[in-house]
Image (cartoon, grey):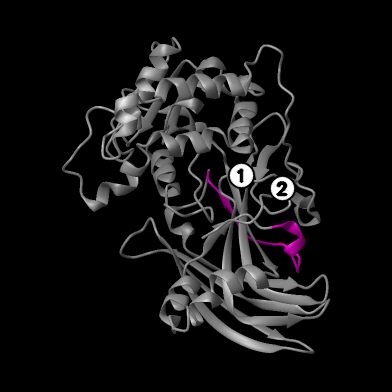
Amino acid sequence: MGRRKNNQNSMSLNNAQHQATKICFNDDEEEENSNLDDSIVATEKAIAMDDVTMSDPNGSFVDGGDDDNTSADYYFDSYSHFGIHEEMLKDVVRTKTYQNVIFQNKFLFKDKIVLDVGAGTGILSLFCAKAGAAHVYAVECSHIANMAKEIVESNGYSNVITVLKGKIEDIELPVAKVDIIISEWMGYFLLFENMLNSVLYTRDKWLANDGIVLPDKASLYLTAIEDAEYKEDKIEFWKNVYGFDMTCIKKQAMGEPLVDTVDQNQIVTNCQLLKTMDISKMASGDTSFTVPFKLVAERDDYIHALVAYFDVSFTKCHKLMGFSTGPRSRATHWKQTVLYLEDVLTICQGEALTGSMTVAPNKKNPRDIDITIKYSLNGQRCVASRTQHYKMR
C-alpha cells in the first residue's frame, strides 16, 4: 500500500503517557567517537556489488549462495540483500541510539566478551569492538555474513570480531559464557519475525550469571486514529472496482495489519501501555499474551483504526537510554502498525473504547503473528461491539 507523509517530529518522548518511563535519546557524543555517517558510508562501500551483479536481477549479490534453499530458508535469504541493511543503517534513530549506548557506556564493554545475535553487516559488533570489548562473536544466518567478514577485515578488527555464519540455535561458540548479548531483534509490531525467541535462547545458553542483555526492555503501546480518507482509498476501494464487486479482497486487506507512518494529528485517544517485556527475565512463552485496553477519546471524532507501536529501553546504561517508534516521535523504519476496524466508531470526548488484544505466533509459521482484537463502545452517538482477527505475514 502507499505511504502517508512521513512524520518528522521530535525524537524525544513528549507524549504524557510516557512520563513514567522517560527515555534519554542523546545526540551528543564524546569527541573521540567517529561520526555515524562515516560508519555508514564505510559499511555501504564494503557491501556494494559490482555493476555486472547489480544488472542481473536473478544474480546472487554474494558468492556462495545456495540454489537449493526451500521456502523455510526464505526469511534468512531476504536478509542477504544489501538493500534491507541499507534501510536499517540509514535509520538514524535506530543506529545512532545503539552507537550512543555503546560509546557512552564503555565501562559496560571494556574487556568483555560480547555476542551479537543477528549481526547483519556487523555494525553493532564494530561499535562494541571500538568501545574496548575483548572479543565479539557476530552471529548471522544469512549470506550477508560473508560481507560482514569482509567488513570486519577492511576495518582492521579481525583480531577482535569473529563472524559466525549460521542460526544461533545451531552455533557452537569457542567460549562457555559471554558477558553481553546485544541484538537488534525488534520487528514490525515489535514481535513480527519472532527473533526475540532466538535472543532468549541465547540468553539461557550463553549469558554469564552477571551478564547483561542489550536492549533489556521493550514496551508495546496502543492508540486509536481517525483515518477516513486512507481507509476509503485502500480498504473500501474493493467494494466497487470499475463497477465490479471485489469485496473478497477487502476482507483480506482488513485482516492484514498495515505498516505505515501515522500523522500524530490523526490520534483521537490516549496512548495506552499494553505490555512491557523484560528481556533479561522473560520466558519464550511470554511472547503470547492477552491484555485489556481502555482508550479514552481526547476530542469528538471518528475512529477507523487502532495503531500499535513500541519503545525500547537500555536500562543498564549510566542513564536510561532508548527510543520510541510512536507517531509522536521521529519516524523509524518500523513505522507503526495500523489495524483497521470494520466499524466506523463515532466517539465523543471522554468516552472510552474498551476491549482486549490477544497476540501469539502463528502455529504454522511462528515468524508470522496472529492478532485478535475485541472492542466495545457504548457511547452517546455510537454503540458497537465486535471481534476481529488479523495476521501479520
Q: Is residue 51 visible?
A: yes
Q: Which residues are magenta?
A: 263-279
Q: Position of residue 142 (x, y in %)?
A: 32, 36
Q: Quadrant of residue 62?
A: top left
Q: Position of residue 204 (x, y in %)?
A: 41, 41
Q: Where is mark 1, residue-wise?
A: 332
**Side of 60 relative to 191 (left or right):** left
Q: Residue furthest left?
A: 68
Q: Are marks 1 and 2 in contact (CB under 8 Å)?
A: yes
Residue beneath disc 2: 329
**Amino acid at circle 1:** Thr
The answer to whether 297 is drawn above or below residue 161 in the figure is below
Residue 344 lies within the magenta run: no
50 horizontally vs 390: left or right: left
In the rendering, at what x and y percent does residue 279 appear? Answer: 53, 45
Determine whether the residue tagged by mark 2 lies in a helix, strand or loop: loop
Q: Residues within 10 Å of mark 2 (few under 14, many from 20)?
A: many
* Identity of the residue drawn at 76% across and 43% down: 10
Q: Residue at x 61, y 44 (%)?
A: 332
Decide: is 147 above or below 90: above
